[in-house]
């Protein structure tokens, strides 16, 4: 296997900081000819890599197909924030899964972070994993809600430090006057996501998984044995896992109608001096506000500010991501007005209508499994999805998989051409409500 220098990984054709700062990434081969395996996994992001690892650890033979390169999609260019929780307001699903099911979802949201913690530690993956995260309240009522969140987390047995920080003490965690309070969580944190993906690909290969890049799936033939076609090859497998998320396109139209690609964008400053970096984020935590058009930011290992957000449902990227994101950054940190932006990039995340990750199997083809629509919580939820899929496919009882599979997911209306504009209108309404 040859090695290649880091490659930019953005649909927006601009330089990603992660690609520029990643470890040397092995060049996995293109699929040529026919391969037979117990399971074929489509997608070389966190969903696919972790499902492959879980299955290989259980003794199944696995082939993984990636259309571009490992970690090319959202897995390799997200904000790098490892935050507890799966889904948004999971109490909404109580009528489907019951109160105990809701509690289990919340516990799995904590477990998801621990899966990443343990995988990084066990395999000594060098990905700048740093603990500490702050929820930022834009309004006083949101800060009041943090107290309820902390109480609930402690009731679930959360073992990590939680600290409520009011507006007067905010200078201890952030150098900005924009917020009404914060909750510090030392059980969540941040990392270099592309280096995590590169490390997990190496783990998968060491377990016997066959990884192929530049091997986009062109056609699927469902049946007792699934036939997965690429331009130059074919995989025959007893089981198929679709882990393409926002990049599923029309590979399975019914499934792709349940996940909407939405653009998210990040800029990275030039390296900041130690004093300025400490002034911005004194405890080196990841941070996220509470708005629909969320701002998220953190420091990199070399003290750049990585600032992201501006979730777009239009299907069109800004012409100049740096020019689009810089005012948002300066609104939070005006002290960076003279600091240069070195990197700017964007890509698609997968959004589901109910904001709960979609983990299950196709009713019409029960040997076809899927995981998608993480709605911004993908760094931890993908690892949970891999564990649940590994349990279910290998024949282990997986109450967690069954729980996720019970929740129905609607197809976005309007077909592939109107889904994004319709959702954009809906999100505009939610943003207007925030102003009230």
Image: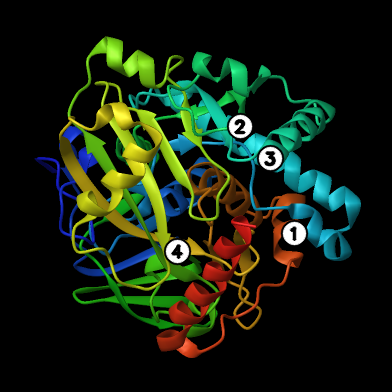
Closer to the camera in the image, 33 or 383:
383
Whole-number angstrom distance, CA of label 2 to CA of label 4: 35 Å
Question: In the image, residue 270 lies at what x, y percent?
Answer: 17, 29
The relative height of residue 175 versus residue 327 in the rendered view (above or below) is above
For the residues carrying marks 3 and 4, which lies nearer the camera in this image? Answer: 3
Whole-number angstrom distance, CA of label 2 to CA of label 1: 40 Å
- Dot 4: within a 10 Å radius of its alpha carbon, few (fewer than 14), some, or many (20 or more) residues? many
Whole-number angstrom distance, CA of label 2 to CA of label 3: 8 Å
Classify residue 214 as left or right of residue 236.
left
Q: Please name the residue shown 71% across and 72% down the image.
A: 408
Contact (Cβ within 8 Å) of mark 2 with mark 3: yes
Question: In the image, residue 261 lies at what x, y percent?
Answer: 42, 68
Q: Quadrant of residue 312?
A: bottom left
Mark 1 highlights which residue?
A: 402
Where disc 1 sits, the SS reads helix
Where disc 3 sits, the SS reads helix
């Amino acid at each position: 296997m040859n090695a290649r220098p880091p490659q930019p990984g953005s649909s927006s054709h601009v330089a990603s900081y992660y690609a520029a700062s990643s470890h040397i990434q092995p060049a996995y081969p293109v699929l040529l000819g026919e391969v037979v395996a117990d399971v074929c996994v489509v997608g070389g992001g966190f969903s696919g890599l972790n499902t492959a690892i879980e299955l290989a650890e259980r003794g199944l033979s696995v082939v993984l197909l990636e259309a571009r390169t490992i970690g090319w999609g959202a897995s390799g260019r997200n904000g790098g924030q490892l935050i507890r929780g799966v889904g948004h307001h999971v109490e909404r699903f109580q009528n489907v899964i019951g109160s105990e099911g809701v509690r289990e979802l919340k516990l799995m949201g904590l477990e998801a972070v621990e899966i990443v913690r343990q995988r990084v530690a066990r395999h000594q993956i060098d990905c700048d994993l740093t603990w500490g995260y702050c929820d930022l309240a834009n309004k006083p009522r949101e800060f009041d809600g943090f107290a309820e969140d902390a109480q609930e987390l402690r009731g679930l047995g959360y073992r990590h430090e939680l600290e409520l920080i009011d507006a007067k003490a905010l200078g201890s965690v952030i150098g900005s006057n924009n917020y009404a309070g914060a909750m510090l969580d030392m059980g969540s944190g941040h990392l270099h996501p592309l280096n995590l993906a590169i490390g997990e690909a190496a783990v998968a290969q060491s377990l016997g998984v066959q990884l192929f890049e530049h091997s986009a799936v062109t056609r699927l033939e469902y049946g007792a044995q699934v036939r997965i076609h690429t331009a130059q090859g074919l995989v025959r497998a007893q089981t198929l896992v679709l882990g393409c998320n926002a990049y599923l396109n029309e590979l399975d139209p019914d499934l792709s109608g349940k996940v909407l690609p939405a653009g998210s964008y990040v800029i990275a400053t030039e390296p900041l001096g130690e004093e300025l970096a400490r002034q911005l984020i004194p405890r080196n935590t990841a941070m996220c506000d509470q708005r629909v058009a969320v701002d998220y930011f953190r420091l990199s290992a070399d003290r750049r500010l990585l600032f992201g957000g501006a979730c777009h449902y239009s299907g069109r990227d800004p012409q100049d991501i740096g020019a689009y994101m810089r005012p948002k950054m300066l609104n939070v940190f005006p002290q960076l007005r003279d600091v240069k932006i070195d990197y700017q990039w964007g890509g698609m995340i997968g959004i589901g209508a109910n904001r709960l990750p979609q983990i299950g199997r196709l009713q019409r083809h029960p040997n076809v499994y899927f995981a998608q629509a993480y709605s911004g919580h993908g760094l931890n939820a993908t690892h949970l999805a891999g564990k649940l899929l590994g349990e279910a496919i290998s024949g282990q009882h997986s109450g967690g998989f069954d729980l996720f599979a019970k929740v129905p997911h609607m197809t976005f209306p309007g077909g592939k051409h109107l889904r994004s504009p319709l959702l954009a209108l809906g999100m505009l309404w939610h943003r207007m409500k925030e102003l009230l």
